[in-house]
Image (cartoon, rainbow, N blue to C red):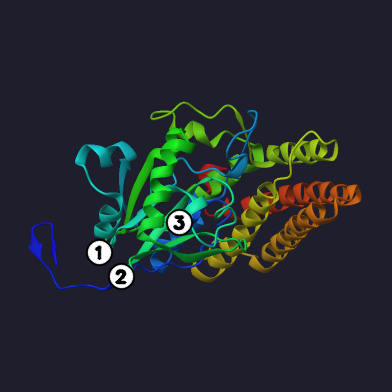
Amino acid sequence: MIRNGKEEMLVESVTLPVVQPPIFGYQFFAFPLCIVLQDKRSLPWLYSNFIQVCFDKRPDPPVPFTFYIHDYTLNPWLHVEHLQRGTMNIVQRNIVEFVRDCLLDGYYVYLNVDEYYIPERAVYQKSHLSHDVLVHGVDLQNETFQLLGFTDKQMLATTSASFQAFAQAYDSIARIDHQAICNRIYLYKIKETGAYAFDLALVQETLEEYLTSGNTSSRFRMVANPWDHCAYGLDTYRCLQDYYERLLAGKAGFDVRHVHSLWEHKSLMVARIKYMQEHTDYLDSPDRLHAAYSEIERKARNARNLTLKFYMQQEEATLHKIMRYLEEIAAAEALAIEQFLTVLRKHQPQLS
């Protein structure tokens, strides 16, 4: 096989490994995590981040409520190359050959495709939909790619698509979607030299901002204007309540992503406390804090399940239960974070 001017051994297939990420409601978060979390050395970075949340208050935003991260591609263990679809025209590369060569060179490929052409997707052969996928494998003998994404069973899983179907799905984006975000092609590769120590100061600062609903995006004002259109931290509960009130009044469409992101945040907070208990000496009474957040996580999970129940049964009483859960979660979390910060301030008194 000749590639990049060099003769190489013929490789019939390549599958770059992925793991199940703790955040998967939005794939742009899930895909980098499913790559870097193969290496346990990335856990200090994970648990130092993903604390703040934000709710976009603008009309019909593509991502209403999720974790606040300035740039989801920035990661100590991830080498990233940013391309645009137009680059393929400039270099005159066939997309199938380009993706194949990237995979053979150890790069995961993140891009948008029209899932009308992708088997085992909810819209397959039904309707056109631009959606992001992570290509992490290729079978040269059978001429297929392995794509990670949400399947027609609503699971984050790997499925296959033929070279021909993938090319059709890629080409169709130009006709169905003209959003700039859908023009991205990102190449991800593990950076073996990555390093990051658990950052207690960052955890404490971000918890403070969560508790006070501070605008965490202001930290990055040297490179971007703050996101003043968002609510942050505890203030997002008001936005969530408003969403369910509008859903109850028939003024908003069903969207499980809000409460799913809420549950992911609480689940990750529980995991963060457990990690700090096992790998640091910062928590004086971890069992009490872990129990408090475990109860918060349980209620968030119940709220998510009730949201799915409402989708199936359309009972107004279910929405009222969800809104009561949100009130309880908000109150309990405010107390839990105060408790969390009281403990951490003993180790970082200068941040009090």
**112 above or below 181?**
below
The CA distance from mark 3 to mark 1 is 19 Å
Judge whether residue 18 can be spotted in this image: yes
Q: Is residue 111 visible?
A: no
Residue found 35% across the figure and 59% down from its top:
163
Q: Are marks 3 and 1 in contact (CB under 8 Å)?
A: no
| Residue 16: percent from left, percent from top | 35, 67
Residue that mark 1 sits on: 104
> What residue do we see at 46% from left, 26% from top?
225
Q: Which mark is residue 14?
A: 2
Q: Position of residue 85 (x, y in %)?
A: 33, 40
Q: Which residue carries the number 3 mark?
A: 31
Identified by mark 1, the residue type is: Leu
Q: Residues within 10 Å of mark 3 (few under 14, many from 20)?
A: many
Q: Position of residue 162 (x, y in %)?
A: 39, 62
Mark 2: which secondary structure? strand
Q: Position of residue 308 (x, y in %)?
A: 76, 56
How many labels were placed on the picture?
3
Between discs 3 and 1, the one toward the N terminus: 3
Whether label 1 touches label 2, CB < 8 Å: yes
Query: Foreground mark, 2 or 3?
Result: 2
